[in-house]
Image (spheres, grey):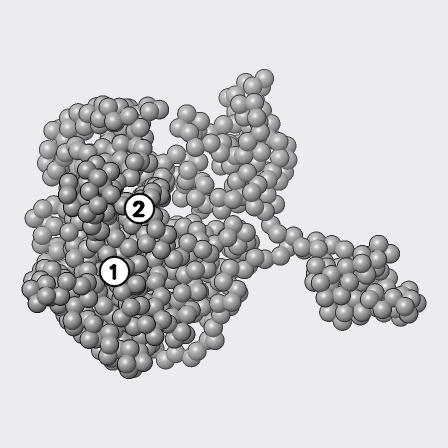
Amino acid sequence: MIAEVIVDISNSEVDRIFDYSFNDPDIVTGCRVLIPFAGRKIEGYVVGIKDNTTVPADKLKEIDSVLDDRPVIGGEMLELMRYMCERYHLRIVDALRLFIPAQMRGGRIKELKKKFVKISPEYIGVNPATFIRPSAKAQMEVYEYVAKNGETDTAYLGREFSAAAVRNLTERGIFTAFEKSARRTPYSAVSGESATVTLTETQQSAVNAVTGADGDVFLLHGVTGSGKTEVYMRCIDAALKSGKTAIMLEPEISLTPQVLKNFRARFGDSVAILHSGLGAGERFDEWRRLLCGEAKVAVGARSAIFAPVENVGLIIIDEEHDSSYISDSNPRYSTVEVAQFRARYNSCNLLMGSATPSVESYYKAKAGEYRLIEMRERIAGRPLPDIEIINMCDELRAGNNGFFSRRLTNALDDCMQEGNQAIIFINRRGYASFMMCQSCGYVAKCERCDVSLVYHREENVLKCHYCNNRYEPLDICPVCHSPHLRQGYMGTQKVAEQLKKMFPYKTVLRMDNDTTQNKDAHLDILKHFGSGEADILVGTQMIAKGHDFPDVTLVGIVDADMSLHFADYRATERTFQLITQVAGRAGRDVKPGRVVLQTYTPNHYVYRLAAKNDYTGFFDKECNLREVTKYPPFSKIVRVLITSEQEDTAFGVLKANFDDINALARENSQCFAYLSAMKSPVKKIQDKYRVQIIARITDNSDYLIKRIYEITDSHANNKVTCFVEINPANMS
């Protein structure tokens, strides 16, 4: 027999099928194998089996061995591989690598085996006094424990009793030793009690709509606190009762422990969690439980869409608007599109939910491409928090140069005196966003990246947030030697430090990428704040979504303008989403909530509409603007990003690509609303210069995108990297 094998090397020159012979009946489609390739042994994936090959017999090599006890890539995933390679122009091996834990490759992680002992059959029911001396008390204690409890971990017996006694009984054949698979369980301390919840009429209507359909795509637009999670769980419960599986996606790793608590309480050991923050062993074991069918519900971040579950009955994407669902590094893909493929393959429903749906999704729902479900009120009729807009220009004119307005300071005082909790949101980590010389204007920048360095006071370093390079902080300007340096915009560190000075007897926690580097750090911070051990939580966007703290009555948005003035067509949309999401953390229980929003542009329509929680008004305004300017959903943005260590090489490939794409645009002038070549907004990252071509295509997009892929392939060489992105989440 002949196996069609993809070699596990991410290189375009070998990204094709190779034929290998085999006689092992365990070799089937979807298994990993060890093969001889280019004079060495390497891993590969069997993607097909056939009877014949055109490879000459003297050149046909044989598969060495199978690497796993079962196929690791199912038929559905092989079809998904083909779809993704065509849709996103991926290398086959890059798509296949998405489907298994990275540590499996190269044998870096395997199933955990532990040693156990049990009483040998011939000694069961026999008086132990006949084979254990009265003086061997340790042996008798161990024997009696195993006789009572059955199979027992030898490590436990060694710790609690006597390793020598266990060894003696094993060597004499009284105990039979064997190995047994052991599970590494992530967030093992996370559990909850299942509560009986009575659905509101709106929730029940949403559940009925989803469970009563087959193969539909739903958009659940529910305000913060409207009970979307309970709807998700009821729909998953219906899928499980029909003998199917489910996938539940969350945008932030920080959200998954809270979701996991609710899901474990409802579905017990049927839930497995998948995300990149897990330990290698934990991720492997959870993935394997799904592969073997032990777990039926996959919960996790973006990568969980590739969970190896079969017979999927429901896929849920919570906070569907979040940009993290777009992979902006190789391999590039859209999680929503992958989910739509899996839903079509399994003829199941796809349910996407958000309090602030993306403009593209809501447009499709209004056009009838998705089925729209609206949940406009919070549970128990609780009011949405009042949002008060503070003009920081007025604060400056009144002599307040601090970064807390008088209104926010007073609100914090009231909140703390009443024994409630507050969340302070600023979407910038670090202490100060840059260091600048006031004499000559020099700004400290990273040597490898074309970005300013961020000052981190706790570590007393200047840090690059792109390559993580670290530098000594400046005492004097390296250009003009002036000692007059000033710090840029404040970040979470500075805000938290100021709050600790304002409220020395209160506990302030900070949650950002710097404080959540360690495993389980997200969980620890949220646990301390949720239990009331802390009074104020300062954080970036990772605190904005999904969290439910009943004692939070105040949310302060320190610098609402931060996301508004990006050179990105989604800037206004993301600002509205962030404000609405973080404001939704206040007043989620019986205590009313309040939001203080600080801005230097208080008359901008995004703040007026966010303050009224008027999503449809915002959507109508934004849609009108995009229709006129031909931005998505009225076009597709195609970005050709070219990077190289030599700037001249990057520009040379840019010109060659642009000339051909420009010729294509002239041939299809009615389909192109915009085409231009330029430097990337971030001109260099990790010593690689970045240039780009931006096109907005309004018609015949699939054909034209395919042609653009062909053009970029024709100019590829080993000195440049070229990626084509469709509607990229990050335009910088």
Whole-percent x, y for residue 144 in the image: 80, 70
Report the Cα–Cα distance between label 1 and label 2. 23 Å
- Vertical comparison of 386 with 546: above or below: below
Q: Amino acid at mark 1?
A: Ile
Q: Quadrant of residue 315?
A: bottom left
Which residue appears at 24% of the width and 79% of the height? 414
Secondary element under disc 2, as helix, strand or loop, is loop
Which residue appears at 18% of the width and 60% of the height? 560
Q: Which mark is residue 473?
A: 2
Whole-percent x, y for residue 50 in the image: 53, 32
Task: Answer left or right for 308 relative to 173.
Answer: left
Circle 1: is it few (<14), some (14-19), or many (20+) Cα within 10 Å?
A: many
Whole-percent x, y for residue 265 in the image: 47, 71
- Vertical comparison of 697 with 616: above or below: above
Between 438 and 344, which is closer to the camera in this rendering? 438
- Marks 1/2 in contact by CB < 8 Å: the verdict is no
Between 670 and 345, which is closer to the camera in this rendering? 670
Mark 1 or mark 2: which comes first in sequence? 1
Task: Answer left or right for 181 relative to 418.
Answer: right
Q: Quadrant of the C terminus?
A: top left
Q: Which mark is residue 426?
A: 1
Circle 2: is it few (<14), some (14-19), or many (20+) Cα within 10 Å?
A: some
Q: Amino acid at mark 2?
A: Pro
Whole-percent x, y for residue 93 in the image: 44, 36
User: In this view of the protein, can residue 37 be seen by the observer?
Assistant: yes
